[in-house]
Image: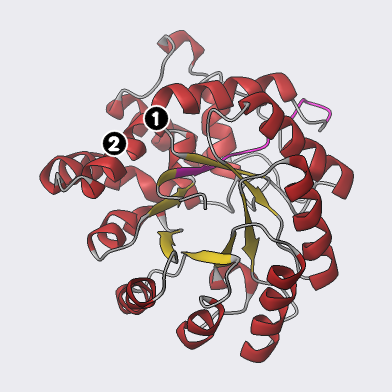
Amino acid sequence: MQVFNGSIVAIVTPMMADGQVDYESLQNLIDWHIASGTNGIVSVGTTGESSTLEIEEHLNVIKHTIDYSNSRIPIIAGTGGNSTKEAIDLTVESKILGADGALLVTPYYNKPSQLGLIKHYEAVADAVDIPQILYNVPTRTACDLEVASTSVLANHKNIVGIKEALDDPYRIKELVKISKNTKDFIVLSGDDPTFFDSMLAGSHGVISVAANIFPKEVSSICRNVLDGNVKEAEKLNHLLSSFYNYLFVESNPIPVKWMLAKMGRINNAIRLPLTELNETYHNDILSKLKELEIFFFSNSLLET
């Protein structure tokens, strides 16, 4: 079974000015992540604008990511949705395309009960024999997959872990207990500002927005923690800690796509109803990026 740990990037979906997917930029991002030591890619997760891609586009991006990566890095397909049938369909198709795993966000807006969440995830796991990672992000979905429900789901052979984006040390501690008591069940942080602390508490890595900008650095933090070199990881995380919150000054992925555009990695394009980052934040973010010396191009490329 594929083991997912370390730094897994929730990769953006690059787009052209007209809103079409920019596959050339996507390929360049994949190469960059592989060269930078990223341990896995989530294709068309929520950061990849899954909610605004049509089903055919969604699957095409996953297919292109799998085909282009050519087994050089594990690919986890974002296949969650607020329709159980749609989640099953996307997960089935992603397995056929060759995905190494699937990441399924909790159904959003519906606000299902805990029983509804359990039945939803069990239905997908029963239907598709592929490693599946639960994804809990209550601040965006308006529902919370509780620890007791996760404990039930962790016993399913196809459910191999959870991405927990709730900033709650007690929650992480309880999930790590489940992991220790359940074979092949991993805990991945989904909260960049606290992922280092989560790993110190026993989680296995992070599915990261920050890794879009700092692939080498986030990978290094994870690798050092997993190898027991906590002091080295702490130094680097401290350096980046003042930056993490800039990733969320507006709804993700607005800030991260704007930053990547300023780095010359992608076009500054995002689909409605999301819009370009408000200029109020531009100077502060550019200043922080320069301070951290993470731009790979000359200052002449940094448009203000």
- SS at mark 2? helix
Determine the image quadrant of residue 183.
Answer: bottom left
Mark 2 residue type: Ser
For the residues labelled 1 and 2, the Cα–Cα distance comes to: 8 Å
Residue in view at x 76 percent, y 36 percent: 63
> Residue 151: in sight, yes or no?
yes
Q: Nearer the viewer, residue 85 or 288?
A: 85
Q: Is residue 298 left or right of residue 15?
A: left
Residue range (magenta):
8-18
* Numbered badge on residue 14: none
Q: What is the x, y in percent for residue 15?
A: 73, 30
Compared to residue 240, the image places residue 216 above or below, namely above
* Numbered badge on residue 220: 2
Closer to the chain start, of discs 1 and 2, is 1
Q: Which SS type dominates the magenta stretch?
A: loop
Residue in view at x 77 percent, y 68 percent: 127
> Residue 83: in sight, yes or no?
no
Mark 1 residue type: Gly
Q: Is residue 288 left or right of residue 23?
A: left
Compared to residue 130, the image places residue 82 above or below, namely below
Circles 1 and 2: CB atoms closer than 8 Å: yes
Residue in view at x 38 percent, y 77 percent: 178
Determine the image quadrant of residue 59.
Answer: top right
Determine the image quadrant of residue 295.
Answer: top left
Farthest residue to the left: give it.
231
Report which residue position mark 1 lands on: 37
